[in-house]
Amino acid sequence: MADPVVLPYVPSTSIFKNDIFKGKVAFVTGGGSGICQTMTLNLMQHGCSAAIVGRKADRLQASADWLQKQAGNGTKCIATPADVRTPTDLNEAVRKTVEAFGRIDFVICGAAGNFLAPMDGLSENAFRTVIEIDLLGTYNTFKATIDELKKSHGAYIHISATLHYNGLPWQAAASAAKAGIDALNQSIAVEYGPFGVRSNVIAPGLIADTEGADRLTPKGAEDFMSMRIPLQRSGQKGDIGNMAIFLFSDAASYISGSRFIVDGANWHNGGFWLPYPDSQLDPKSIKDLISGSKL
Ligand code: HXC
């Protein structure tokens, strides 16, 4: 059987100019860790200043320090602690950001909470908690930042998922929340397009080295799951960063209200009944499994 082709991740700094976001400012919820931290780093590497938002002040400050050091180009990052469930916290975080940098151009609504549990194994409070962090948190972040984005003709990116495209077990609360986020994205794009504000969704698939992958992936199944992904690898956090760079850049100035799935074509792969990718790379190897096949 032929070896599968694995297309490598290529960092944004090898593709986009390093100063495309010079003078711009990003406000990123969930920026203390995971893909939102990497998106922040990638924006900073292209000249953007940033404010990151999270619940744990110590961890957030450590992340801001790390981001500034890692970007290594003089761009600044400040920590503005807030719980996205609390509008007054967010208003204060926005105030501090504008005080520090004078403006906000880009907003990433990325703060999320999730765990695996069957619907009847969730308490009402557990369901509400996920909806409050993911969906209401996105609305609250929008509400706190829209006046600044109207002034700057800025753009939103909302971090959604693909899990609500079908009925994924043990993900009812997150699925409902992400479906709501997709709907909010469309409303923001239509209501605020005339103010020069754009809004788009990124729907990441399985991204390695994230809390999401750690919480949601069965242990020991990483290789099997990567094989099921048509592009034959789990995503890197920088794959999501690359999409964020593109969507915030002027190259995307006519793109709004859209969803961008970054998952290596994973959610399209419904062919569960044939060994994969063997059925593609060496069709004859599976001919005995298919009655009537003319392989
Ligand atoms: C059932 C659970 C549970 C579990 C918590 N609860 N974990 N129920 N199974 N595994 C219940 C609690 O018992 C409680 O209900 C209610 O949820 C609220 O829990 P708290 O701990 O009080 O809430 P809080 O401190 O606000 O924490 C929120 C959290 C937590 C979501 C529950 O896990 C968290 O802070 N997560 C943040 C980080 C995170 O989840 N990152 C991963 C995102 S991954 P009761 O009734 O007992 O009061 C992601 C990717 C999606 O979003 C897409 C991937 C492809």
Image (cartoon, helix red, strand yellow):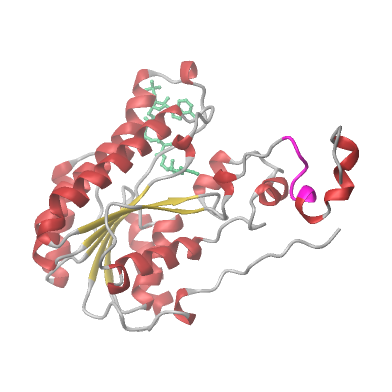
Residue 273: image location, x then y, percent: 73, 35
Task: Residue at 20% x, 40% y: name it.
Answer: 86
Q: Is residue 122 above or below residue 231?
A: above
**Ligand 1, image quadrant it occupies:** top left
Decide if residue 194 is on the left or right side of residue 162: left
Answer left or right for 202 relative to 291: left
Q: Nearer the viewer, residue 295 or 226?
A: 295
User: What is the x, y in percent for residue 61?
Assistant: 33, 62
Residue 48 x %, y %: 28, 74
Q: Quadrant of residue 88?
A: top left
Residue 176 horizontal side relative to residue 193, left or right: right
Residue drawn at (57%, 69%), measured in percent from left and top? 9
Q: Main secondary structure of the magenta part?
A: loop
Q: Nearer the viewer, residue 147 or 163?
A: 163
| Residue 80 screen position, x and y as percent | 24, 58
Q: Is residue 83 visible?
A: no
Residue 36, quarter of picture: bottom left
Q: Taking 55 as reference, is 24 above or below it? A: below
The answer to whether residue 176 is above or below residue 139 is above
The answer to whether residue 184 is above or below residue 154 is above
Residue located at (44% from left, 27% from top): 172
Can I make out residue 102 in this image?
A: yes
- What range of the chain is rendered magenta? 273-279
Q: Give the number of callouts.
A: 0
**Was residue 277 drawn as part of the magenta stretch in this picture?**
yes
